[in-house]
Image (cartoon, rainbow, N blue to C red):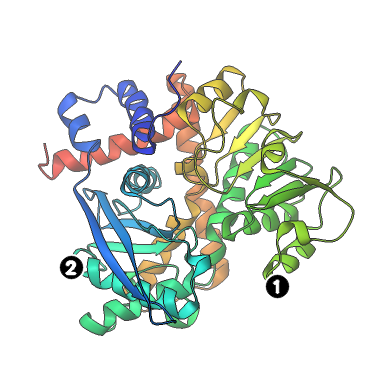
Amino acid sequence: MVREGLSAFEAVNHYFSDAARIIDLDDEMCAVLTTNYREISVQVPVRLDDGGLKVVHGYRVQHNGARGPYKGGVRYHPDADLEEVRALASLMTWKTALLDLPFGGAKGGIAVDPAAMSADERERMTRRFVNGISHVIGPYRDIPAPDVNTNAQTMAWMMDAFSAAHGWTPAIVTGKPVNLGGAPGREAATGRGVIDVLEAHCRHSDSDLAGLRIAIQGFGNVGSFAATEAARRGATVVAVSDQWGGIRRDDGLDVEALGTTVAAGGRVGDHTGAHDVITNDELLTGPCDVLIPAALDEQLHGGNAADVAASLVVEAANYPTTPMGDEILGDRGIVVVPDVLANAGGVVGSYFEWTMNIQQFRWKVDRFNTELADRLGLAYAATSAFAEDHDCTLRQAAFALGIDRVATASRLRGYV
């Protein structure tokens, strides 16, 4: 059994190695694909509203650009560090390749608690961060997007900071407000895409999404849209949580009313109505058909994977399952749809937005959603077919497909 306690980057490379063996990837290519092209750590001094100065540190890691410009989100979180950003940048490389998008993988972050800052302070911090990395980003070089604790407003500040020096450049970021070149449908794309992938899995396994009992850890951008879309398609959302705790109702929560509570600034636990109050740990191991971790990383691990009651885990968060947790789930016959496939709706939507910005032509939301479901469905079909042909897990199949495509591009470009 793989040991617990691997760093995030070590864990991702463990998944890489598992898949690389299946496709007989040579040692030289492995050396190229398990290291990063560029890593940047920048000092970000922020003038606070009270006149004081706060110095935080920001990161941008560009993992591999063999298939196109680097692509990946920027998160604001106290635990963001270079090791975490390295892991997430690598995941983006395999995700974009698996979805056959013309991007490489990157990720960024600032080690800060944005909840302790005013909007003006967050804006000043964002602009200073862009100034620090502007020489390595661009619409054909590296295209940031929202991630944990960042949103459309953050992207608007980033775009404006870059455009002030380079001219109007809406394609420098994705996930922008619609009024500044954002794509209708992009905000919901990650959460909606999770349910598109779940529906593709149901079609493949001759089951029905309608009636499934679903538990969702996390009710931010991804979790809330996933819950809304699951309920709209007939599933029963039995449990939801945020960082403060969760609620459960076995005959189904009122997702629409819960969304209204949270949109008004409340917590999941503030929702009124008949339900039981639960912890995040209880949500992860409570009775349900489908568990969707849509919060932070390493939520399913050696300490709780043996207690998961769901028969299917759909990873809406990035790296929510450690290698030991993944091994335990697999040994128990629990199917895991990996993050590089399950939450790829966000980067697919970003690709649509990027192409719209370059062409200066906006799609209608119906076309956006149709194209999103089609691309995710094709990726699921390719992944499940590979898994069956090679008698491996969906995670191993998804990584193998992505790695093979990146390796092919790297050889054609003369990297090795």
Badge 2 element: helix
- The number of discs equals 2
Residue identified by numbered label 2:
135
Q: Residue at x 30, y 73 (%)?
A: 128
Position in image of residue 214 (x %, y %): 72, 43
Q: Is residue 283 left or right of residue 297?
A: right
Q: Is residue 384 left or right of residue 86?
A: right
Badge 1 element: loop
Image quarter for residue 76?
bottom left
In the displayed structure, 326 sits above or below 412; it is above
Badge 2 vs badge 1, beta-carbon distance below 8 Å: no
- Name the amino acid, label 1: Ala
Task: Work out which quarter of the rendered image holds the C terminus and state it.
Answer: top left
Image quarter for residue 204?
top right
Q: Nearer the viewer, residue 394 or 138?
A: 138
Q: Residue at x 34, y 81 (%)?
A: 160
Residue 284 visible in the current orientation: yes
Residue 181 visible in the current orientation: no
Mark 2 and mark 1: span between their CA atoms? 39 Å
Q: Residue at x 67, y 46 (%)?
A: 216
In the displayed structure, 163 sits above or below 297; it is below
- Name the amino acid, label 2: His
Position in image of residue 25 (x %, y %): 24, 25
Q: Is residue 250 left or right of residue 298?
A: right
Q: Residues within 10 Å of mark 1 (few under 14, many from 20)?
A: few
Q: Which callout, 2 or 1, points at the residue further toward the start of the chain? A: 2
Q: Residues within 10 Å of mark 2 (few under 14, many from 20)?
A: few
Q: Nearer the viewer, residue 152 or 124?
A: 124
Q: Is residue 363 left or right of residue 87?
A: right
Residue identified by numbered label 1:
264
Position in image of residue 189 (x %, y %): 53, 60
Q: Which mark is residue 315?
A: none
